[in-house]
Amino acid sequence: MIKIGIGYDLHRLEPGRTLFLGGVEIPHPRGLAGHSDGDCLIHAVIDALLGAEGETDIGRLFPDTDPATEGVRSTMLLGEVVNRLRRKGFRVVHVDVVVVAEHPKLGPHFSRMKEELAPLLGVDGAGLGLKAKTNEGVGLVGREEAVACWAVALIEKTRRRNPDPAKT
Ligand code: MG
């Protein structure tokens, strides 16, 4: 059984925050606001995976009122979501991402993002698509007030529920 999901997220850029995007730290005068590290790329991927699972969304799974996830790296949240899928007998087949940011240029950071995210997803480098767009100076993203991200995820049921994800 093959299932597909879509995810979207947008976070504001604020001074005094470290910019985390795609699981990596990127030198920039501003970072993404958020309860966690603000990594909206990973949040969009998580929502795509949860959507494919036919379940909840990131806000219900990791409420922004939970002190336990305050300042947490989103890579950790992604790892939890992938393990949750594995326990249900799914594997991630492919994830594709469009990130929209006026600045900084993200293409030079894609190889590091892949090194970080592909192992977490359990795919090889070709199993993760990353594309960057600007918003042509238009709107919140164009004015460099925010970064937006869309993601789609394809997952496949490979076996019945697996209570021990370490054995996948
Ligand atoms: Mg978010």
Image (tube, grey):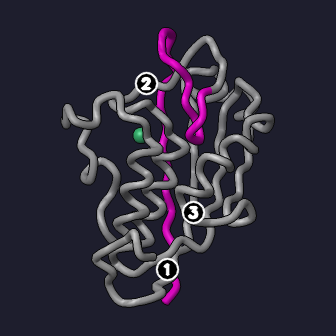
Which residue lies under the disc numbered 3? 152
Q: Nearer the viewer, residue 93 or 10?
A: 93
Q: Nearer the viewer, residue 104 or 70?
A: 70
Classify mark 3: residues with Cα within 10 Å, few (<14), some (14-19) or many (20+). Answer: many
Q: Is residue 160 above or below residue 141?
A: below
| Pointer 2 or 1: first along the chain | 1
Magenta-colored span: 1-25
Q: Is residue 30 left or right of residue 113?
A: left
Residue 106: % across, % down = 73, 34
Callout 2 touching callout 3 (CB < 8 Å):
no
Looking at the rendered structure, the kind of residue marked 3 is Val
Q: Residue at x 33, y 56 (%)?
A: 57
| Pointer 3 or 1: first along the chain | 1
Q: CA distance from mark 3 to mark 1?
A: 11 Å
Quadrant observed for ligand 1 in the rendered image: top left
Residue 3: assigned label: 1
Quarter of the image where one finds residue 128: bottom right
Q: Residue at x 32, y 84 (%)?
A: 161
Magenta-colored segment: predominant secondary structure:
strand
Q: Residue furthest left?
A: 66
Looking at the rendered structure, the kind of residue marked 2 is Ala
Q: Is residue 84 left or right of residue 45?
A: left
Q: Is residue 84 above or below residue 21?
A: below
Residue 33: assigned label: 2
Q: For numbered disc 2, what is the local secondary structure?
A: loop
Q: For numbered disc 1, what is the local secondary structure?
A: strand
Q: For numbered disc 3, what is the local secondary structure?
A: strand
Q: Is residue 10 magenta?
A: yes
Looking at the rendered structure, the kind of residue marked 1 is Lys
Q: Is residue 118 above or below residue 3?
A: above
Residue 105: % across, % down = 76, 29
Residue 136: % across, % down = 75, 31
